[in-house]
Image (spheres, helix red, strand yellow):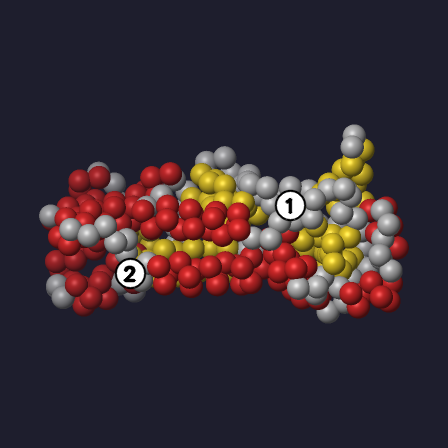
Amino acid sequence: MKALQDLDIFVRTVDTGSLSATARVLDITPAAASAALKRLETELQAPLLVRSTRSLRLTPEGALFLEHARLALSTLGEGMQAMTTGRHEVQGVLRLAASSDMGRNVLLPWLDEFQARHPQLRYRITLSDRMANMFSEPVDAAFRHGKPRDSSLVALPVAPHNRRVLVASPGYLASHGAPATPQDLALHDCLCFMLGEEVNDRWTFRRGGQEISVRVRGGHVCNDGDVVRRWALAGRGIAYKAWVDVAQDVVHGRLHVLCPEWDTEPTPIYMVLPDRRQLTPGLRLLREFVADACAAWPQAPALS
C-alpha cells in the first residue's frame, strides 16, 4: 500500500517538522521520504509542503489536505486492525479538548473509568476555556458548554438539559445573606467569567412570562471557569455556573443554590467534531459513555 505509506510520511513529517526525523522513525532514507512526498504532490497536483534546508511549512493546500490524511490513516488503521486481529476492541489515541472546570473536576474521573473499560484506548486532553480551532489544532473532539457558533462544526449533545445555577458558599451567605430575587444581585459581590476580552457580567433569568437581565459586578473576574468555582467555594461571592460543574459541591453542602424559583440560562453540553466522518468507534463509545454519566449526575433543583 504505497499510497498509504506516502500519506503516513506526509503526516509524520508535519508532526515532526523534519523529513530526516520522519525517515529515522520509519527506518528509511531521507531521500525515500522526500520521494514519497513528491509522489503525493504529483498525485494531488498541488504542493503540500514548502521545504528549505532549515525548515518546512504547510502550504494552504497542505493544511487543507492534512486533516483528511489524518482521518484516512485513522480509518484504515482501524480497518486493518479489525482484519488482522478479528477483534472489535477499539484502540488508538483520542485527542480531546474540554473546558477547564468540567474537564478538570468532572471529565477526568470519567475518562479514567472509560479507559478502564477500554484499555486499548489512550487519550490526550487539553483543558482550556478557549474554543480550540478544530481545523488547525490536533483535536479530534471537544466537550463544550453551548452549541458552537461555527455552523460547519458537528455538535452532538451529551447533556442537553444542563443549565446555569446561582450558587454561593455557606460562609458567604452567613456574612452577606442570600439574594431574595435576581435583582438583589446588584447588592452582592459576583464572580464573573471572562472569555477573551468579553466579561460575562449580564446574567439572565426567567419566571413565567417575565425575563430579566441583571448587570452584576464584583472584584473577581477570571478567564478560567475552575477559578470562578474555587472563588465561590472560598466564599468570595456569588457565581453563575453550569450545573454539571457544581452539582457535587451542592450535593455535599459546599455550595447552596440561590433563587431556585427562577429559570436560568440553558447551557447544554456537546461533543464537538470538525466532521461527522471523524466520529470513530472510540469517539462514539466515549460520547455514549459521557452522555450516560451526565444523565446519572445529580439533577438540578426543580423550579418551584
Amino acid carrying label 1: it is: Arg
Q: CA distance from mark 1 to mark 2?
A: 34 Å
Q: Residue at x 56, y 57 (%)?
A: 102
Residue 134 seen anywhere in this rendered image of the structure: no
Name the one closer to the observer, 199 or 93.
93
Pointer 1 residue:
163
Is the C terminus in the top left, top right, bottom left or bottom right quadrant? top right
Picture coordinates of residue 17, whole percent (x, y)? 30, 61
Q: Earlier in the sequence, mark 1 or mark 2?
A: 2
Left or right relative to 256: residue 51: left
Answer with the quarter of the image where residue 57 lies.
bottom left
Disc 1 and disc 2 in contact, CB within 8 angstroms: no
| Residue situated in front as seen by the camera: 93 or 66 | 93
Local packing at callout 2 (Cα closer than 10 Å; few below 14, some 14-19, many 20+) is few
Q: Which mark is residue 120?
A: 2
Task: Confirm whether residue 266 shows in the render.
Answer: yes
Q: Amino acid at mark 2?
A: Gln
